[in-house]
């Protein structure tokens, strides 16, 4: 079909980003070729760019980078792919699982021992895994679709946290991930305290449902939470920012028989010391959460479609692919909220 070239981002070595032409890839039997319309910049991409984190492919192998929050229009469909047609608008679930291993059989598809990642979203065209590709409802823009992946991971986190009605939940981190957790915790009927250190972001969090907001650079979080909860502490804390300091704060503000969710990775790696007696006597559960399963990805799209989670207010920058270094710079310097890269400039 196509033999022409496309533009794609490459990482030659950490911090050495270039844009180059390369042939448009061809789909295998269970793959789909997508004209990429939008790719959300995730902190994972920035870690990779800086040489940290779990992805370490550089040079020729790196085309499209770790871009994994992407959406677009189907251009070519592999022969084994069902229900997806040319010109469908789609959002990509970047985790391809085997369906047969011990984890897949427990519906923990994100832990599949044979999983493959469909990344490479920073390019004009990309390959997606047919079986988990979702069609986009007409009313969801390509930019909004970039939130389906991060929101699905937050759904996993909220489910693992077992947030329930009437609980007080503190979220540490006023970035996109904090804002998505906030809306999910509200949907579960919790009262939500947002803790961050950007007043502009905290204001947005109020607009999308935060009951209380605290700037940790301006007030003593421990005192404020004690006052707010009559010294009981909160029922759950979501740690939605990297670094050990946030986890240490979480251990201070959480009450008895409570949960702390560690959502963010920390790079370079650090350690903290925890008093086992605090965990034991106060019955504190420290729970990790990362990525999402197939069901959560589907639920995520539904929540955005029905307007139950609002993502438009979280989009702050839309940058063309040729200026990807500017997009990364914005995210690295924590300016705005969600930055989205657009490989094609024409309208939908
Ligand atoms: Zn991500
Ligand atoms: Zn598997």
Image (cartoon, grey):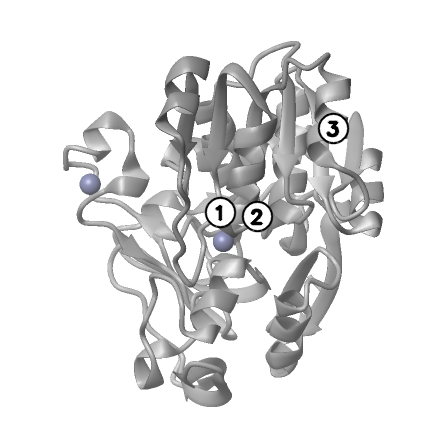
The residue that label 3 is drawn on is: 223
Q: Position of residue 260 (x, y in %)?
A: 49, 29
Looking at the image, tell me whether mark 2 or mark 1 is earlier in sequence order: 2
Asked whether, in this view, residue 25 is left or right of residue 17, the answer is left
The residue that label 2 is drawn on is: 241
Dot 1 alpha-carbon crowd within 10 angstroms: few under 14, some 14 to 19, many 20 or more? many
Asked whether, in this view, residue 321 is left or right of residue 215, the answer is left
Q: Secondary structure at mark 2?
A: loop
Q: Position of residue 155 (x, y in %)?
A: 51, 32
Asked if one can make out residue 344 in the rendered structure from this viewpoint, the answer is no
Asked whether, in this view, residue 60 is left or right of residue 336, the answer is left
The residue lying at 52 percent from left, 39 percent from top is 248
Q: CA distance from mark 2 to mark 3?
A: 21 Å
The residue that label 1 is drawn on is: 264
Q: Give yes or no for contact between labels 2 and 1 (Cβ–Cβ under 8 Å).
A: yes
Q: Position of residue 76 (x, y in %)?
A: 40, 64
């Amino acid at each position: 079909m196509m033999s022409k070239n496309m533009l794609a981002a490459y990482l030659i070595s950490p911090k050495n980003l270039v844009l180059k032409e390369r042939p448009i890839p061809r789909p295998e039997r269970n793959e789909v070729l997508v004209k990429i319309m939008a790719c959300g910049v995730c902190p994972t991409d920035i870690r990779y760019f800086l040489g940290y984190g779990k992805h370490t492919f550089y040079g020729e192998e790196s085309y499209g980078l770790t871009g994994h929050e992407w959406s677009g229009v189907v251009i070519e469909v592999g022969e084994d792919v069902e229900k997806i047609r040319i010109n469908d608008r789609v959002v990509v679930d970047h985790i391809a699982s085997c369906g047969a291993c011990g984890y897949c059989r427990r519906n923990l598809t994100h832990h599949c021992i044979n999983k493959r990642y469909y990344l490479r979203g920073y390019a004009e065209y990309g390959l997606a895994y047919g079986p988990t590709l979702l069609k986009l409802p007409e009313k969801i823009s390509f930019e909004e679709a970039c939130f389906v992946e991060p929101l699905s991971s937050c759904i996993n986190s909220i489910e693992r946290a077992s947030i329930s009605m009437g609980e007080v939940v503190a979220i540490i981190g006023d970035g996109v991930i904090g804002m998505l957790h906030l809306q999910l915790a509200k949907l579960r009927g919790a009262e939500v305290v947002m803790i961050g250190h950007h007043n502009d972001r905290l204001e947005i969090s109020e607009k999308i449902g935060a009951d209380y907001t605290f700037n940790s650079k301006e007030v003593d979080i421990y005192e404020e939470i004690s006052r707010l909860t009559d010294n009981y502490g909160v029922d759950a804390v979501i740690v939605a920012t990297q670094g050990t300091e946030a986890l240490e704060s979480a251990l201070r503000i959480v009450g008895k028989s409570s949960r702390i969710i560690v959502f963010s990775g920390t790079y370079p790696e650090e350690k903290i010391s925890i008093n086992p007696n605090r965990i034991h006597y106060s019955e504190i559960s420290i729970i990790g959460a990362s990525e999402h399963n197939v069901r959560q990805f589907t639920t995520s799209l539904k929540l955005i479609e029905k307007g139950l989670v609002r993502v438009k207010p979280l989009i702050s920058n839309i940058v063309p692919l040729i200026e990807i270094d500017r997009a990364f710079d914005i995210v690295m310097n924590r300016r705005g909220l969600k930055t989205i890269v657009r490989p094609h400039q024409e309208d939908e």
